[in-house]
Image (spheres, rainbow, N blue to C red):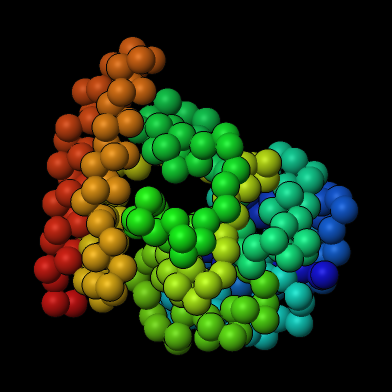
Amino acid sequence: MNIDIICPLYNAEKEIEKLHKMLLMQKKVKINEIKYILTESKDKTEDILKELKIKYIKIKKEEFSHSLTREKAAFESKADIIVFITQDINITQDDWLYYLTKDIIEGTVQAAYSRQICENSSIEKYTREYNYPNISRIVSKNDIDKLGLNTFFFSDASSAIRKDIFLKLNGYDQKKLPTNEDMYFAYKLIMNGYKIKYCAESKVIHSHKFTLKQYYNRYKDTGKFFKQNKYIDNFGTNKAGGGMAKYILKRAIQDKNWKVILQFFPNVVVRYLGMQIGKRTNK
């Protein structure tokens, strides 16, 4: 089965050259095309793409949508498997893509996503540990009673989906989702009887250092998503968030990470407020 890699770009001058090099180094897979979609940028991303003779599509800033931009590229794909990535992942394995797509090719699952590791000592380090453990698992509709909302956890920072299934389920239903388009599609996969693999063997480095304001805005967008898709919210956002918060505090104490311990309560409050306000907004 061949693969198309779809990657939106915006102000990516610091990442694009290294990212493209690592994509070309992938072994034991058949890459049909690497599809970059460049949103108009203020930096030198386009100059670098031209210099390296990398094929790309350019769109205006107002045209970009987390869901619609990816959906359009996926619908136009001629490959058997579509792989979504973001520009800010750091791929260090030459078999990252092999492990990500292996079970799809073998027919065990219809979608998969990679393990993400944070290399800094921020709260995100523990968030990544909680969401991306070192043991792989496959989830299906049978796991909903046990896992609740986490059954639909999925990340298009590094994910793979069978193209025919993406088409059959109509992608993101042509909706302009504010965020969580990956969870939106994962819900459709699971509820239609398909399986998703969390692939711990397929690792990427994905690190951020968000401010409290950035956390607030991200969770406000997440709240908007759950308001628009209340049937997903019914599976327990508060319970899922509470479990992660307990894990973060426990691990920070174990590591004697005083910076995270001091930041923990303001961070939890900001996330909670952002989520609740997002759920109540009319825009």
Who is closer to the viewer here, 212 or 110?
110
How many numbered badges does the structure rendering display? 0
Quarter of the image where the N terminus is located: bottom right
Residue 39 x %, y %: 53, 72
Q: Residue at x 37, y 75 (%)?
A: 177
Who is closer to the viewer here, 24 or 45?
24
Q: Is residue 163 above or below residue 42?
A: below
Q: Residue at x 24, y 48 (%)?
A: 239
Residue 210 x %, y %: 35, 42
Q: Is residue 123 left or right of residue 220?
A: right
Q: Residue at x 43, y 69 (%)?
A: 187
Q: Is residue 30 above or below residue 199?
A: below
Q: Is residue 240 left or right of residue 111?
A: left
Q: Is residue 22 left or right of residue 156?
A: right
Who is closer to the viewer here, 261 or 28?
28
Residue 88 x %, y %: 56, 50
Q: Is residue 257 above or below residue 279?
A: above
